[in-house]
Image: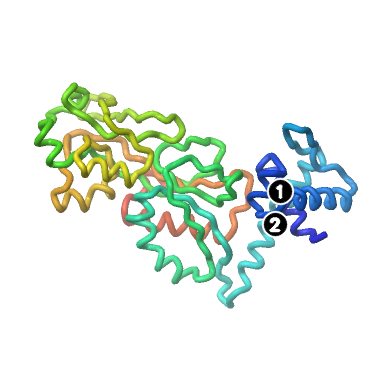
C-alpha cells in the first residue's frame, strides 16, 4: 500500500461522500479506492468510516484522522511545490472556475504575467457561470460575482464591480428610449434576463436616485445563464441589459451599446474568490487569489478592505 495514495483516497471519499464519486475525481477504479481505504484502516487498526448502502460517514476516530491528514497532505504539497527552483516559487496543478466574461476580457489576457511570475503553476481553467461543486468536481477555487450561494465556503472579496443599464441602438429605435427605470416594465419594453444558476430565475435589480429607490424586474423574451451569451443577446437588440461596467465599456465606446438611467445608482456587484472551508490554503492557491486581487485592484477595487 502506498500510504499517501491511501490517505488521498480516504480524504476524497470523505469530501465527496461516496467511493464512486471519489474514484471519479481521482481517476481510479472504485475497487481500487475501496481497497486503499480498507488497507489504511487495517494499518491503523481502527475503523475510519461507517458504510451503508446509502451513505458514508466518519467515525469518531475517522474525524480526528481526517482533520490531521488534510493538513498533512496540504503541507506535503507545499513542500514538493517549493522544490522545482531555488526561489521556492509555488508549483503544481490548480483547478479554477471563473465566469466566462471575466475570463475572456480580464483574467485570460492577464495570464502571461501570472505565468511569468509563477512558471511552475499549471492551471486547469473552467469557464462557466454555473454553480460548481468544489468538492465533488475537485476544484480548488471559483471566482464569482454577486452574493455567494454557498455560505459554507471561505471567500475573499477581491472587487466591487460597477453596474449599469444598457441597450443596443436598434432596440431603442424600435421600443423607444425609456425615461425612467419603471418604463422597462411597460408592455412594449423587454429586457434580457440573466438566469441565476441557483434559482433558475431572472434576478430583480435594485436602483436608487437620491431618496427614491425601486426594484426592476422587467419582461423578457430570452433568459440566459452565461455571461458572454447574455451580452451577445443585448448587442443583438433583444432587450435592455444590466452589465458590469468592464463588460460594457468597449461596446459603449464604439456605439454598440447605449447607457441608460445614468442619474440612477445600482449597488456594485461584489466579486469573490471562494474555496473549500476547513482546508489548508496551499501556496499555489494563495498565489492565485493574491494575483486575482491584484488584477482587480486596478479595475474595480473592493469598497471595503479584503480579508
Left or right for 166, reference 26: left
SS category of the residue bearing label 1? helix
Pinpoint residue 189: horizontal percent, then vertical percent.
18, 27
Q: Where does label 2 land, which residue?
A: 73
From the viewer's perspective, is residue 303 above or below residue 290? above
Give 55 or 78, whichever is nearer the viewer: 55
Pinpoint residue 178: horizontal percent, then vertical percent.
13, 30
From the viewer's perspective, is residue 183 above or below residue 162? above
Q: Are marks 2 and 1 in contact (CB under 8 Å)?
A: yes
Question: Which label was assigned to residue 11?
Answer: 1
From the viewer's perspective, is residue 95 above or below residue 177? below
In front: label 2 or label 1: 1
Pinpoint residue 7: horizontal percent, then vertical percent.
75, 53
Left or right for 214, reference 6: left
Left or right for 196, reference 131: left
- For the point 54% across and 47% down, which residue is it? 275
| First-in-chain label (2 vs 1) | 1
In the rendered image, is residue 307 in sight?
no
Quarter of image, res 214: top left
Quadrant where the N terminus sits is bottom right
- For the point 34% across and 37% down, which residue is it? 224
Amino acid at each position: 500500500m502506498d500510504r499517501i495514495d491511501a490517505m488521498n483516497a480516504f480524504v476524497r471519499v470523505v469530501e465527496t461522500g461516496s467511493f464512486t464519486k471519489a474514484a471519479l475525481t481521482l481517476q481510479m477504479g472504485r475497487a481500487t479506492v475501496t481497497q486503499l481505504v480498507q488497507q489504511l484502516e487495517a494499518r491503523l487498526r481502527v475503523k475510519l468510516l461507517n458504510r451503508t448502502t446509502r451513505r458514508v460517514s466518519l467515525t469518531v476516530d475517522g474525524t480526528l484522522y481526517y482533520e490531521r491528514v488534510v493538513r498533512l497532505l496540504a503541507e506535503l504539497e507545499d513542500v514538493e511545490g517549493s522544490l522545482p527552483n531555488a526561489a521556492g516559487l509555488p508549483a503544481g496543478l490548480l483547478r479554477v472556475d471563473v465566469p466566462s466574461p471575466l475570463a475572456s476580457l480580464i483574467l485570460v489576457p492577464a495570464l502571461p504575467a501570472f505565468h511569468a511570475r509563477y512558471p511552475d503553476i499549471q492551471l486547469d481553467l473552467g469557464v462557466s457561470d454555473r454553480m460548481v461543486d468544489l468538492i465533488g468536481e475537485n476544484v480548488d477555487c471559483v471566482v464569482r460575482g454577486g452574493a455567494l450561494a454557498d455560505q459554507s465556503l471561505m471567500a475573499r472579496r477581491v472587487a466591487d464591480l460597477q453596474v449599469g443599464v444598457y441597450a443596443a441602438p436598434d432596440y431603442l429605435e424600435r421600443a423607444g428610449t425609456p425615461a425612467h427605470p419603471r418604463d422597462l416594465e411597460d408592455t412594449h419594453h423587454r429586457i434580457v434576463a440573466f438566469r441565476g444558476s441557483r434559482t433558475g430565475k431572472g434576478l430583480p435589480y435594485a436602483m436608487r436616485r437620491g431618496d427614491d429607490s425601486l426594484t426592476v424586474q422587467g419582461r423578457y423574451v430570452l433568459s440566459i445563464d452565461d455571461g458572454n451569451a447574455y451580452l451577445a443577446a443585448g448587442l443583438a437588440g433583444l432587450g435592455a441589459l444590466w452589465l458590469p461596467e468592464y463588460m460594457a465599456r468597449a461596446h459603449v465606446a464604439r456605439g454598440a451599446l447605449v447607457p441608460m438611467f445614468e442619474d440612477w445608482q445600482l449597488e456594485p456587484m461584489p466579486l469573490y474568490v471562494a474555496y473549500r472551508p476547513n482546508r489548508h490554503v496551499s501556496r499555489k492557491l494563495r498565489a492565485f487569489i493574491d494575483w486575482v486581487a491584484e488584477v482587480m485592484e486596478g479595475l474595480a477595487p473592493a469598497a471595503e478592505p479584503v480579508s
